[in-house]
Image (spheres, grey):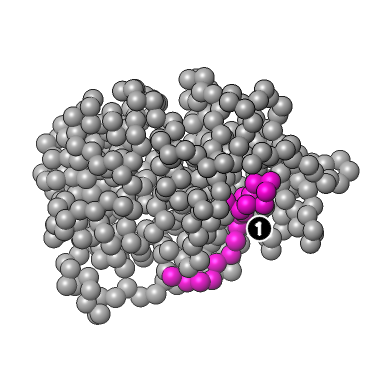
Amino acid sequence: MHHDPVSLTMHQNPQAIPMMNAAPSPPSALTHVLGRMEQCLDSRKEEHRYYPIQADDLIFTTACPVCGSGEAVTLVEVSLPDDLVFHATAVCRSCLFVFRPVSPSYHWFQRCWARIATGTLEVFNTALETERRERYRIYLGLMQACRPTGRVLDVGAAYGSGTQLFAEAGYQVSALEPENDRANYIRRSLGIPVYQTVLQTFESEPGTWDIVLLSHCLEHVDGPAEILAKVHRWLVPGGLVYLEVPDLWDIVDWTDGLFMTHKSNFTPENLSWLVRRQGFDILQTRTIPRTAGETSGFALVLQRRDFAEAHDETAVVAPFVLTDPAGSLIAVQHCYRKDLSDLAPPLDQPVLLRVPYLDQFYHTIRRDCGRFVREIIPGGQQRLVFVPRPEPPASGGARSNAPLAPG
């Protein structure tokens, strides 16, 4: 369906916020990462693409994927002009895990990946891959100290710069990477075996891997507890996991509600609780500093606990307990209002965002192509509506919300 220009019912002197607003000091990690993404798109003169989405492309989550609680507070909802809420963000009252109760399915993302595939052996962002390799040097040192040889699975390997580093160190390495161009590059340019699929659908025989690398992967999956349970089965007894995720307190500002590819945000506390519950012992905790192209990371070196012990009733992890539930919830709500200033709604209301279309499947819209304005909707709630700058029609005709053709 075609979306007409957004019609606004505004107060006099409507307020607006540019999408590329002034960066905080220091900038949040998310602002930093999105800026780098857009700079790379601009330098390559990438034309804008439009990514249709409809109700049957969505998945819905009601209970907290970490602790199972059904008590969650909605933080952000993002809708199209036809009122389809295609992306929402909530925080669990019990464990402070931030997740997406509404988000696109992996089938939708796979269609997007197919659409951007070039079929060429070209690294999209060489600077980012150089930085990735330097981060993997840290991971390699940690793993070599515990297990200097063995079979390694690198999950979410991108273009394989870090995977290659482990191969050069003598490990028997395979990569898991769903995006077409990336998987093709790993396979043909680096000669490393690659499984081209998403972590949710990948299966491996029990006891296959000595080490599994999950660097900035767990925040991209819908069921982190189920994924960790699968990884536990795949490891040999005493096998290791390098697990790194962005820290909620570092990465979140108000634009996280528009960030499509992250399905969740962890705190160090709820992540540590989850891995113990899924049968792992924590050997080390680390903070990996932010680099030019990546967020800082909260990292854990994990060891697979013996299967029998992991399922022994006496080894059950105690329930997660927040020391200050009310204060913690308010702190998260403030994160999702960071840099909105006086456009932020009261804490008892979610941040409601409306966009006219999706032109970047990783974070909904290009941030420098318009501005948000505030409107008051029935019931007295406020909503921020994105108004794009006038531009020539997209090639191929009007923007459409029809489903993408496979491939």
Viewer-nearest residue: 191 or 67: 191
Quarter the N terminus occupies: top right
- For image coordinates 25% across by 62% down, the residue present is 280
- For image coordinates 39% across by 59% down, the residue present is 223
Residue 188 found in image quarter: top left
Q: Is 7 left or right of 88, judged from the image as shown?
A: right
Disc 1 element: loop
Q: Which amino acid does label 1 sit on?
A: Pro
Viewer-nearest residue: 140 or 50: 50
Judge whether residue 81 is colored magenta. yes
Viewer-nearest residue: 285 or 387: 387
Viewer-nearest residue: 37 or 392: 392
Judge whether residue 89 is colored magenta. no
Q: Is 375 left or right of 309, judged from the image as shown?
A: right
Q: Which percent across, then down, holds residue 325?
A: 54, 69
Residue 78 in sight from this viewpoint: yes
- For image coordinates 26% across by 59% down, the residue present is 230
Quarter the C terminus occupies: top left
Q: Is the residue 161 above or below the residue 337 in the image?
A: above
Q: Is 166 left or right of 3, judged from the image as shown?
A: left
Q: Which percent across, then down, holds residue 252?
A: 53, 48
Q: Which percent across, then down, holds residue 162?
A: 27, 35
Residue under numbered circle 1: 350
Q: Which percent across, then down, holds residue 403?
A: 52, 42
- The stretch in magenta equals 68-86
Q: Is the residue 108 above or below the residue 349 in the image?
A: above
Residue 28 in sight from this viewpoint: no
